Amino acid sequence: MALLSRSQAIGLQVFWIMISLGLLGAWVTQFNRLTMTQSHVESRLTGSIVCVALVVMAVCLDSSDPFGDADLFDGKFLRLFAMAGVIGMAFWCLLNATDFTSVLLILVGKKLKPVLHEDEEGHEAKWDKYTMVEYGVGGTWLIFAALLAVDSQNDNSVFPMIFVVMIIIGMIASIVMTCAGLYRGYSVKLGDRDNVKVDIKKNTRRLLLVKLCQILAVHLIVIGMCMADLLLGTPWDAKIEGETQTILLIYGFGSRILVIYAMAFNWIAFDESGYIENSLEERRKHYKVMCVEQKIDERIELEKLNQEQGNRVVVEDLETLNTREKDEYDAKMAIHRETGENERYLRDLEARLAKGQRIDDEDEELGLTTK
């Protein structure tokens, strides 16, 4: 029995098509801006736009004949499109969660546990446990997705249910790893906010917390859709009616809402792409003038903090080094910073992650500036 009347089905299909065209145009815009970007492009952004492309392609195919009225697709093919959209969002969650968790641990100076392997050039490379989870869970999903596609026309196939269960397990694994990373990241005391660098680090850590909480919420929505599929018995019928139509509607609404959010989450503004950000006039706006003595004082304070926390220090005999007392002027300058300072610092950390620099080393500046 069909859940929607003829007029309702036509109206929903028109709505589906309008959303799909809007998503397609937005994705093309983002792809162009990503390819135009002259600065470093994080691998997370590239992977995210590929995941979003999979979901957009799935919803576009689904919108062409969502109820089988034109006999373009039967219920099994529409279920495949729905599962493609879900797996695309699952990959998006996994990629962004592991990346931001790794960046958080780099921010607080936590060393990620490496696993050695040989790269394409024969050199020894390192995988941390978050990279292992990302590749392990993602590889498992791809294997079961291939098995599902091959056996999709079998009426008694068990792969739909297994595939849905594997998505749920992978999402739970990603949530556990992300929560563990958040606990480790917030167990480290960064110091007093009077230090400009510490203040930026704390603000960036809070920014990462907000982003990871949003990503975890998307995890839960994906798990909810998959649980609904299991409660309905994972219907896999050629006829689009009853429970099959119900789960298609759930996946249809859920995938479209989530892909809109995923696209907005990593949205690349026009002024962040092309030659605008890298033009001379724009760079001059970020030029800073700082006293050399102030930089030396900040480094001595940082070394003293590392010594108190039992970390490695570069400068010896710190007790004999004195720094000037801060006055009201220093306090005002420490508080005043430009808008977007934390976002720039976060991008620098992601660049460090891409280069495999797993340990926070204060000898290398990460774009921290004071004014």
Image (cartoon, helix red, strand yellow):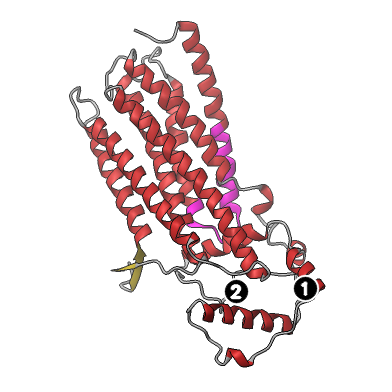
Please give the residue where the numbered disc 2 appears in the rendered image: 365
Q: Count residues near mark 1 (Cα–Cα under 10 Å), then give few for <14, some for 14-19, many for 20+.
A: some
Tell me which corner region of the image, top left, top right, bottom left or bottom right, holds residue 74. Answer: top left
Q: Where residue 361 sits: x, y (%)?
A: 52, 75
Q: Which mark is residue 330?
A: 1
Q: Quadrant of the N terminus?
A: top left
Q: Where residue 298 sits: x, y (%)?
A: 66, 79
Q: Which residues are magenta?
A: 23-45
Residue drawn at (33%, 13%), measured in percent from left and top?
242
Q: Earlier in the sequence, mark 2 or mark 1?
A: 1
Q: Secondary structure at mark 2?
A: loop
Does the rendering let one see residue 96? Answer: yes
Above or below 141: residue 180 = below
Give the amino acid type for the residue marked by disc 2 in the picture. Glu
Select label 2 or label 1 by which is in front. 1
Does the rendering let one see residue 49? Answer: no
Above or below 321: residue 58 = above
Residue drawn at (54%, 35%), measured in percent from left and top?
260
Tell me which corner region of the image, top left, top right, bottom left or bottom right, holds residue 51. Answer: top left
Above or below 273: residue 289 = below
Tell me which corner region of the image, top left, top right, bottom left or bottom right, holds residue 327. Answer: bottom right
Residue drawn at (46%, 39%), measured in percent from left and top?
218
Along the horizontal axis of the image, is 93 left or right of 229? Answer: right
